[in-house]
Image (spheres, coloured by chain):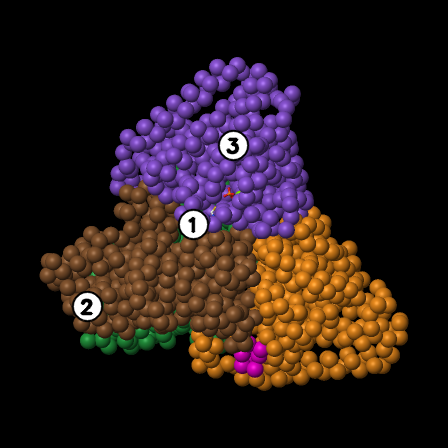
Chain colours: A brown, B green, C orange, D purple
Amino acid sequence: MARKTYVAAIQEALAEEMRRDPRVFLMGEDVRIGVFPSTRGLHAEFGGKRVIDTPISELAVAGAGIGAAVNGLRPIVDLMFGTFLYLAFDQIANQAGAMRFMYGGQTNVPLVLMAQNGAGSSAGHHHSQAVHQFFMNMPQIKVIMPSTPTDGKGLLKSAIRDDNPVLFLHSLSLGGKRSDVPENEYLIPIGEADIKRAGSDVTICTVGPTVYTALGAAKTLSREGIEAEVIDLRSLSPWDKGAVLDSVAKTGRFVAVDESFPSCSAASEWAATVAEAVFSQLKAPVQRVTNKDVPMPFSPALEKAVLPGEADVIAAVHKTMAYS
Amino acid sequence: MARKTYVAAIQEALAEEMRRDPRVFLMGEDVRIGVFPSTRGLHAEFGGKRVIDTPISELAVAGAGIGAAVNGLRPIVDLMFGTFLYLAFDQIANQAGAMRFMYGGQTNVPLVLMAQNGAGSSAGHHHSQAVHQFFMNMPQIKVIMPSTPTDGKGLLKSAIRDDNPVLFLHSLSLGGKRSDVPENEYLIPIGEADIKRAGSDVTICTVGPTVYTALGAAKTLSREGIEAEVIDLRSLSPWDKGAVLDSVAKTGRFVAVDESFPSCSAASEWAATVAEAVFSQLKAPVQRVTNKDVPMPFSPALEKAVLPGEADVIAAVHKTMAYS
Amino acid sequence: MHHQDIAVDVVLDIYQRILRIRRFEEAVGLLFRQGQLPGFVHLYIGEEAVAAGVCAALTDEDTIISTHRGHGHVIAKGGDIKRMMAELFGKATGYCKGKGGSMHIADFDIGMLGAIGIVGGGLPIAVGAGLSAWYSNSNRVSVCFFGDGAANEGSFHESLNLASTLALPVIFVCENNQYGEFTPAQNAMNITDIADRAAGYGIPGLVADGADAFEIYRVTAAAVERARAGAGPTLIEAKTHRRGGHAEGEEAFLAGQTYRDEAETAEAQAKDPLLLLHNYVSENKILPANQLETLDSNITQAVAEAVEAARNSPDPALESLFEDLWL
Amino acid sequence: MHHQDIAVDVVLDIYQRILRIRRFEEAVGLLFRQGQLPGFVHLYIGEEAVAAGVCAALTDEDTIISTHRGHGHVIAKGGDIKRMMAELFGKATGYCKGKGGSMHIADFDIGMLGAIGIVGGGLPIAVGAGLSAWYSNSNRVSVCFFGDGAANEGSFHESLNLASTLALPVIFVCENNQYGEFTPAQNAMNITDIADRAAGYGIPGLVADGADAFEIYRVTAAAVERARAGAGPTLIEAKTHRRGGHAEGEEAFLAGQTYRDEAETAEAQAKDPLLLLHNYVSENKILPANQLETLDSNITQAVAEAVEAARNSPDPALESLFEDLWL
Ligand SMILES: Cc1ncc(C[n+]2csc(CCOP(=O)(O)OP(=O)(O)O)c2C)c(N)n1
Ligand SMILES: Cc1ncc(C[n+]2csc(CCOP(=O)(O)OP(=O)(O)O)c2C)c(N)n1
Ligand SMILES: [Mg+2]
Ligand SMILES: [Mg+2]
């Protein structure tokens, strides 16, 4: 086991899968040089046919990925920033997710879409929105958002081997994060949560970069004597309802932490599910901690204030603990 | 007061507002002839400069609406089917909703977008998805989905006078519905729900065509002695939390009915909000009734089975009533 | 119109494809008017020579992608009219088990990769099909059918440019039937020939007479050769006419409004591809009249059987909603 | 390069616009390297003659829309460098009160309708600005700046076609700096001149030397005249060079990889628009050397003051998050 960065782990996942399966290839804007460094170096090893720089044409590039996938290849399409997926939204919602069902099972779409999700680099509204909630609403699109290098590698490898369309969301803010990455080949199944911290008093459910926010908050809370269980969902669609409901059954309190605008967010989905499924075990109302409901500002101070912070999580936990 | 169809009421709203304010104009694909008949006849009265047929170019047409709106006009852009909004998603999420904030209040975007939402005409996945949940997530986009001709007219007129971007969603399946439409000018404010039926036992919250599903279910339930309060939200963003929470405070039971795929749906948002805000008054877990989580099928039998039906609503109510 | 460079069996093959489409579509139109078909239906009558001429120049390995007006493409590629008709009825025996419908028929076994209801939505997918051929060093060619209206979608631009940049074996067949719904093409673009857009991507752009199946066959064959040689995509614009409305039942939308004049309708009638080809085949004595009649009655009979079978087929079981999901 | 048909005060006006952009951008580059600026920064150095030449041909009523590489456009249109610099620092005194940042500067008072971080995202909005001028029978012209990379987005296609169809007063200015990020334009399209795409929309397409501010001024003035006369849009392709990287700090992305060769860098250097114009103005004795120096030192001074003011400005108050929302 070596400690590796998120970027290095993703690089490994891509390279290993491309070595393993000649049908796997990568395309997108500047994947050759690697605007996001996780695709860097692949061109040197695999050449221009398997690491394809494309024009800036998100709709066509995503659609070409779908077309290649239904023709027996296993494309990985890097669309760079999550907000650029908006330009390919039609192909994803209307085609990728639906084709198999719509054509009565005649085909399937083993496509991986990659993008950076959410804020944190003070890049303004056009580069800082979280998009996962949109794709969670679409039937038959899998969505993963691993928070550690280890999970990133294992889940991305699973995504590439998956016979269905998978959206892999990563975060610029996690690019330099390190964790122990096994030397041997491993996979992490899509749909399994990871309990990052056991706790008996409250369940905090989250995903992606806010896992660290939640863990930070849990540490502070622990000093006050409140033991939070922190669940990193890792996969958003399908998601590990079992793990969450089991935890809430134990703690009786639930806080959803989600970097997203509040309405129709992942946090809303988790909170509604918990409220529906384990109502009798709830000792306090479910709580959501999300972005403030305003566009993403540029100023670092404002950006920080919009995003869910440790203080927000702590406040939500306090609220749920104080409830009676 | 005369009984008018939904289509006629929308026609009136458009014509009245175009008469009132020369800055108001309409553009879209075939708005002149009127693929959806609500724009029909406007060209004869207002001419080609105010009723503009466009090429099939959703992204540019929506963006042109934004550009016209920030330059002092009040465009109404008809994008036909809700799923075609996917092609304009970038302009809506990145620009229309954000511009005012992003540019520090220098401008505003008095734009109305129109589209038909959801299923019901057996047109297959590409023409039958509900899209409202996506736009509910976007800060600073208003979303309305009136269920009656009367509300349609009053809300659309409010939308046209609103200084912010508003998405007006209508439904082919409601086009022929009739209700009493006042002769005199009237407006219905965005953000106010309408309690369609008072009841003491359970609150059913819904919007658009499923209002009728909920009312049908309420009628059946009433025969069993269960009195449901049926709330037609009419506006989805902002939405009338007050009306819903007051009702649940009274009934103690909550069922959200929403024609949408389940995850991150409007139903999830309403259910989470209720569970968060009036937990102590809840006598039973909140319930969601949504589409089945599969792409939209063509076959009328299958389509019907995917959509929330009266039986589904009744089952959810029974579940919440039986809870103890 | 002449077939000097085209073998007689190809001529007959094209003729049969056209006839099969025509009889199928006539039956569909009637069924729709009788209220027997759910959803929307967009007929291909008047445009048959395009699909027939193009598909006759393809092998079974080559793939096509289609549009909301897709029945003709499926039939031209060799689709089974029984399974098509059942799909239009939304029946379990249909191509997509009733899940797709008129706008979403596919037959992956014959390289018919699906009809797509989103205008312009098929072009990127066709580029991907071409990309897979290029990637696998296969000889396959990918064809995309789309309309004049679709040529104004961003996807058209991105797809032609992407295919050109990677020199992919894709043939873009624009069926310019002069209208997108009720909007004349000339009101939606400021050019006469969509083929002229090809220059903006550095690829050949050709105008062909969509009523002349032989011409369509010839330009397609040349584009196929070019594509297989690795020289990249071609844009073919077939000038054509739809004889009927945009969608069946459009009279309801129109409510007395008109958008076409009589001269145009007369022109479309004169350029009817079935009529032209029928006359050509008869005049050139390629097949005697009685054999032509037999052909027609056989096809008409097959269509009638397809209708009967579809009508008698079961609706899909509700459980089928939970099939054909994630593998 | 010659200015025979251009008044001397226009020459000097253009010169100052270019100089102001250059000094501003140099300061921004330095600040970024010093870690004083948040977010991403894309400099316009090397391309200044385009914005300056275009904007000199516009009135204050005419509008422009810009890109992620937008500082030069704002300054050329007459923007206030104090409020710009404050915005880059994310301060309350910035153009957007710190909410926009480098990629989202706007000044609606001078017809600068905003920079847009989505590649190609500005084109449809510029069409809307042109539409509003057409609708209101105003004389206003709408200009959209965008890059060679943006010319491959669907929005380019839809926007040019829409503007052409309605004959709107829009001028599309493509700044072809040969790269979209690290991808050479010639790897992303199969044509040499993006201007050739204009034919696909039935509008004029012109190639101009982006290092020659006079040529840019001239072609823009002609396009403005055309637009005001109601004859519709024009596509101008300015061949230009960005002297620096795609974004400041790109060395980190590159990690030793290169994407440009020395010949090219040398060419860009030789075609530096400030250098060329400076030499021209000096050689033609349009302004004596000492006045040129004064000009430069005044601008440099103003930029330094803008930096100082920005640095000393307050961060936006957290309550400002809840301002500039729905009216
Ligand atoms: C993205 C999108 N926009 C609009 C529509 C509605 N629509 C269906 S067919 C059609 C006209 C298409 O015209 P064209 O491409 O010329 O094809 P044709 O119908 O003439 O065969 C339109 C606008 C759609 N299905 N998809
Ligand atoms: C829709 C979209 N795709 C990708 C990007 C990432 N991106 C930012 S700038 C850029 C290159 C743009 O190239 P060009 O249009 O030539 O402008 P230049 O940077 O050369 O001025 C890219 C790909 C983006 N911002 N928006
Ligand atoms: Mg057409
Ligand atoms: Mg460039």
Q: Which residue is mark 2?
A: A198
Q: Amino acid at mark 3?
A: Glu
Mark 2 burial class by Cα count in 10 Å: few <14, some 14-19, many 20+: some
Sort mark 3 into few (<14), some (14-19) or many (20+) by Cα contacts within 10 Å: many
- What's the magenta region? C90-98
Q: Residue at x 63, y 31 (%)?
A: D219
Check disc 1 and report the residue beneath it. D255
On the same chain, marks 1 and 3? The answer is: yes
Disc 3 is placed on an element classified as helix
Q: Which mark is residue B175?
A: none
Q: Chain of mark 2?
A: A
Residue located beneath label 3 in the image: D48
- With A57 as the anchor, is C282 left or right in this view? right
Could you say which is closer to the camera, residue C65 or residue D278? D278
Give the residue displayed 34% in from the left and 37% down from the top: D34
- Give the image location of residue A218, x and y in percent: 18, 59
- B39 drawn magenta: no
Q: CA distance from mark 2 to mark 1?
A: 40 Å
Position of B313 relative to D15 (above/below) = below
Residue B259 screen position, x and y as percent:
40, 66
